[in-house]
Amino acid sequence: MKKLVVAAATAALGITGPGATSASAATDASDAFRPASLKWHACSGDIVNGAKAYDHVGPVEVSSIIQCAELRVPLDYAHPNGQKITLQLTRTPHQGTGKAKGDIVVNPGGPGGEGALFGPAFYALNSAPMQAAYNVIGFDPRGIGFSKPAISCDTDYSNAPRPAYGHGDAKFEASWLKRSRAYADACDRKYGKGSKVDLLDHMKTIDAVRDMNTIRAALGHRKLDYYGGSYGTYLGQVYATVFPERVGKMVLDGNVGPGNVWYDAQRPQDVAFNENMDYYFGWIAKYDDRYHLGRTQAAVRKFYYGLEAELAKAPIVKNGVAVGASELVDTIQNAAYRRSQAVWHSYAVGLSAYRSGDLDTFLDTFGANTTGGSDDNEFAVYHAIQCTDVKWPLNWRKWHTDAARVDRKAPFYAWFNVWYNAPCKYWHAKPGIPVKVGHTRDLPKNILLFQATNDAATPYADALELHKILKGSHMVVQDGDRTHCIVHRGDTRPGGIDSYFDAYWLQNRLPAKTTVHVSQLGDPTPPSNSAHTMSPTGNPAWDVIKNGHDGGAEKRRRRGPVAGGPRQRVPLQAQDSYDQGGDGVSVVGGVLPTEGTAGFGYYAEACVDQDSGLAPVQVGAGQAELLFPDGDVFALGEGKWLAYVRRQARDLGAGDAGQRGVLEAVGHIGRRQREHRFVGVGHIVQVLVDGLGQDSGGLQASCDQDVDHAGIVPVERGRGQPDRLRDLPVRDIGESVPSEQRDGRREDLRPSRTWYGLGGQVGGTHAPARSRIGRRRPERGGKE
């Protein structure tokens, strides 16, 4: 669930109270609504570019086959002929011959997670037999993503540094209560009563469930085949209760406990996140020779909470990027969501950088932009749903007392959860009464649940509760695993998680027992020192910069109580080989993370003699990223890459003159960028050569000849999607390639040397980041 950063806050009052019984398909108004047939067509450039992020996940290039359709549904199903809104659907078609075995409708969670692009992401991670058999249908639920209207209340809500979450401090409480009220008021002004579309009164889970039933009808199916992760499991539970006879196959992964919707869900989440963070601190201590933060769990924990306290008093702000206590929590909480080398190592390196005085790396890892705002769609929808599904406490004393009690034993997440959900205290739309899950005749007996025992976002106890309520359901449990949502997480062993998933869909086979247990995959290990400290070329200067400004990237960087929460940086995952044989061809392979804007992936060969690979560029609104030699990807605010270039110059031995030369060249690049809209790797090479040439003659000499052939990478403003250039002549250094010479595809730029392209994907994960139902981790959208 989304909150899985956010989801945590969801608990609910009155789940078993009067009127909390479910409707049936025979009586629910939406089952009588007859939607228009879907008309599948080519998708818009934004959706195609988003799907490109998953082109290299598997053998199928999903961006080339994805299809789109729009579905008009009633704003209020009680008035089916009244005002309509539009849902965005995508279809990633099966690759087998003949008719597809079915359409699997998928939802990543949230609440608020975008689902249109989750469709191709999910499809890309399916096994080859699944891709041959099934179409995958993604959809943006009402108010989300590409659906219209899409909710956005205050894009500046996330600007850093925000007040610390604190631990019950009066000063922070006053500030957050004021902010929370202001956000709720902003949403009401735009989407409440009296607005053009009174969306806030029609954003409950039951509204989305009725939309799902309309999608089923529009697809022409008598029954719905469904996969839901995190909050998506709650959508599935409610659907199975309200429309039991409409359920075909259903998989629920990372399960929400229906008895805690939504306020009461915070407490178990707080405890579980605290346990997982303590476990992570112990992992860091185990590798103290790498991270130097303490040899024991207690020592690392002491360092972390000491750092949080320091940042609460004095946030670090530099070059438009800031890290305060809240930004730190927003980002590092991802370590409690997923046990992976990419996540755990990246944050440990960031903490270690702070201890060693490397504030630039620390800011790169945990920082958020101080200005410019961010897309708050996911954050806004999260509240639109959870704040109206059920009535939240209005007495602040209860909120404070409950949080203070938990904070004494589990301090990591308690107040974060409170402030993420606090707008619900002031929400204007009228709350409803949740459906009583399982309270129906004809409940399906074939629902399959997946759950990790140490999932923090949706604790194991919730899954056990749901398994009991959904009589006849089966559950696959991964013992000891700490990952939220476990399908498609790499367990392809015979008898592993994905084998149960495939058997269910392909062979209609449930586990032999109602509950089966699968062993965990174990903890990650840090990457080798050589991989971390050196680039593939052995020269850290040349794999350095992916410059540019991607407006969509801001969506990836938003932090904390803001839509979607912080976005995690995921290390590069190698997919191609590096050529260090001196033949003049440098291949840099891998995937760069993307969220909301998709793609990236193109590396230029600039200084060929050194087998150098330079990172691609993006153009947009104040967002830059760096690819470090060790493969870690860090998002940087505007101007941050300039400081990094200077650092590289210093590390290469450049004196004051050389560093001044770098800054002068950087200034020229900034002007060129504004003039031409494009910044290319050639510009970056020129900066290093010109700047270092003044007192690093060896570097100048080694690059003089080949640098003239450095390619320029064009990108589309605001989308962060590099394009392919065909048969263009060699361009001079610093010259931009005209936009009309782009063909809008991927890969392959050939100046005088060979160019290699990369697709983008969130390292080893499903979608731009799947939401969790718990607190919103940097990945709040579903599976991540």
Image (spheres, rainbow, N blue to C red):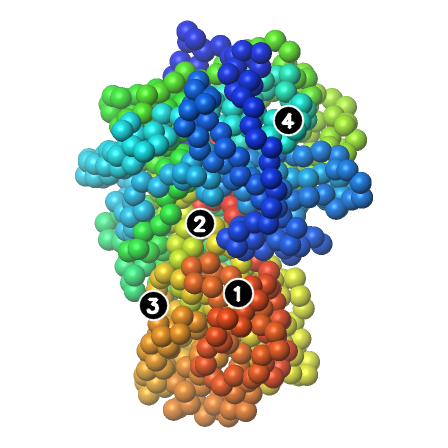
- Kindly identify which residue carries mark 1: 722
Question: For numbered disc 2, what is the local secondary structure?
Answer: loop
Checking the image for residue 274, the label placed there is: none
Given residues 468 and 350, the one toward you in this image is 468
Q: Distance between the residues labelled 1 and 2?
A: 21 Å
Say few, some or many: other residues with alpha carbon within 10 Å of mark 2 (under 14 / 14 to 19 / 20 or more).
many
Number of numbered discs on residues: 4
Is disc 4 in contact with disc 3, using a CB cutoff of under 8 Å?
no
The disc labelled 1 sits on which kind of residue?
Pro
Judge depth for marks 1 and 3 and give the one in front: 1
Sequence order check, earlier mark of 1 and 3: 3
- Let me know if residue 455 appears in the view: no
Instruction: Please tell me which of labels 2 and 3 falls first in the chain.
Output: 2
Give the labeled residue for mark 2.
567
N-terminal-most mark, 4 or 3: 4
Residue 737 x %, y %? 49, 76
Q: What's under tag 3, amino acid-wise? A: Gly
Instruction: Give the image location of residue 277, x and y in percent.
Output: 46, 41
The amino acid type of the residue labelled 4 equals Leu
Real-space Cα separation, disc 4 to disc 2, in angstroms: 32 Å
C-alpha separation, residue under disc 4 versus residue under disc 3: 49 Å
Q: Position of residue 282 (x, y in %)?
A: 50, 45
Q: Label 3: which residue?
A: 639
How far is disc 2 from disc 3 in space, using C-alphas?
20 Å
Which residue is disc 4 drawn over?
224
User: Crowding at label 4, few (<14), some or many (≥20) Cα neighbours within 10 Å?
Assistant: many
Check disc 3: other Cα within 10 Å, few if <14, some if 14-19, many if 20+: many
Q: Is residue 66 above or below residue 750?
A: above
